[in-house]
Image: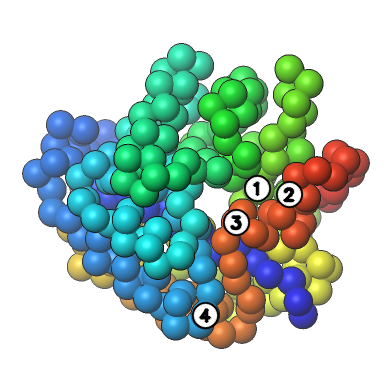
Amino acid sequence: MDVINAFTIDVEGWFNMLDIPGGPGREDWQRLEDRDTAQTLRMLDLVERYGARATCFMLGWTVDHRPGLLRDIARRGHEIASHGYGHDLLYEMTPQQFRDDLQRSKEVIHRECGTLPRGYRVPGFSLTESTPWAFQVLADAGFDYDSSLFPSTRGHGGMPSALRLPHYVDLPDGKRIREFPISVTHVFGRRIAYAGGGYLRFFPYRLVRRWLRRANEAGEPVILYIHPHDADVGRPRLRMPLKRRFKCYYNLHTTMGKLERLLQDFRWGTAYDVLNRALPAAAPPANATGRD
Ligand SMILES: [Zn+2]
């Protein structure tokens, strides 16, 4: 199998969870412990051990408050992309607020490593049918690709109607932007995410491997997404409803083992490189790619 898959990390704080009433607000973040630098570097050590490179979608706030982290990641040859600045839900922002958040994230990345991010991923997969304008804002801000679409249903965010494979999004101004949606598989006719976050923690490895293999055998690249806190067994527990608590903290101890087996069993690269193989920037628009 020569399909290369994308290994991506959303680099943010362990407290950057969305929709938790009474959870730490922006004014509290600064006094909370930095557990994220160590967890991020631990994941990258693992990726490098298998000769791969990852894409790090950096939260601007984290870049500002974890000195040296972004520079270290860039120096080690990983792709630096943007996760926005303040970790706000897109569907609660105006286009202007989104523009400002993107601009701020680009500035901190450029300040730290001298390059601009090509890729973007929204917090909480909150690019939905109610925010179609977001793609044009991203293109205007100079982004080459987006990886915000979650082509299934979920608690917040998600776009069940989205194409499930890399595709072009046609923009109102006649240009296009590339989209790399989160990978889903079909289980009893339903689209199920499996290669990231709580889904990866939840499913047994043999199922994840079977679904990923099925995709690669069909010639489809998979995009894995993970957070530093997905492997942080000792992270402080926040108060939240039981269902949410399960999603946030279930099986944290299995993450590193599953990532290692994925690195052993499949080929991995950055989102930008994988996207370039799947969907050349100069090629004509895909017609029906990604329809079920
Ligand atoms: Zn996030």
Q: Is residue 137 above or below residue 257?
A: above
Look at the numbered discs 2 and 1 and tell me whether their residues touch, using CB distance below 8 Å: yes
Disc 1 target residue: 181
SS type, badge 4: loop
Q: Residue at x 45, y 77 (%)?
A: 48
> Is residue 160 among what the camera can see?
no
Where's residue 2, x and y in %? 76, 77
> Is residue 287 among what the camera can see?
yes
Disc with the residue nearer the chain's start (4 vs 3): 4
SS type, badge 2: loop
**Mark in front: 1 vs 4:** 4
Look at the numbered discs 2 and 3 and tell me whether their residues touch, using CB distance below 8 Å: no
Q: Residue at x 46, y 21 (%)?
A: 99
- CA distance separating discs 4 and 2: 24 Å
Given the image, on which type of amino acid does mark 2 rest?
Pro
Identify the colour scheme used. Answer: rainbow
Mark 1 and ligand 1: say if the CB distance to the nearest ligand atom is below 8 Å.
no
Disc with the residue nearer the chain's start (3 vs 1): 1
Given the image, on which type of amino acid does mark 3 rest?
Ala
Disc 3 target residue: 271
Disc with the residue nearer the chain's start (2 vs 3): 2
Where's residue 128, x and y in %? 59, 30
- CA distance separating discs 1 and 4: 25 Å
Where's residue 208, x and y in %? 61, 72
Given the image, on which type of amino acid does mark 1 rest?
Pro
Q: Is residue 17 left or right of residue 159?
A: left
- CA distance separating discs 3 and 1: 11 Å
Disc with the residue nearer the chain's start (1 vs 4): 4
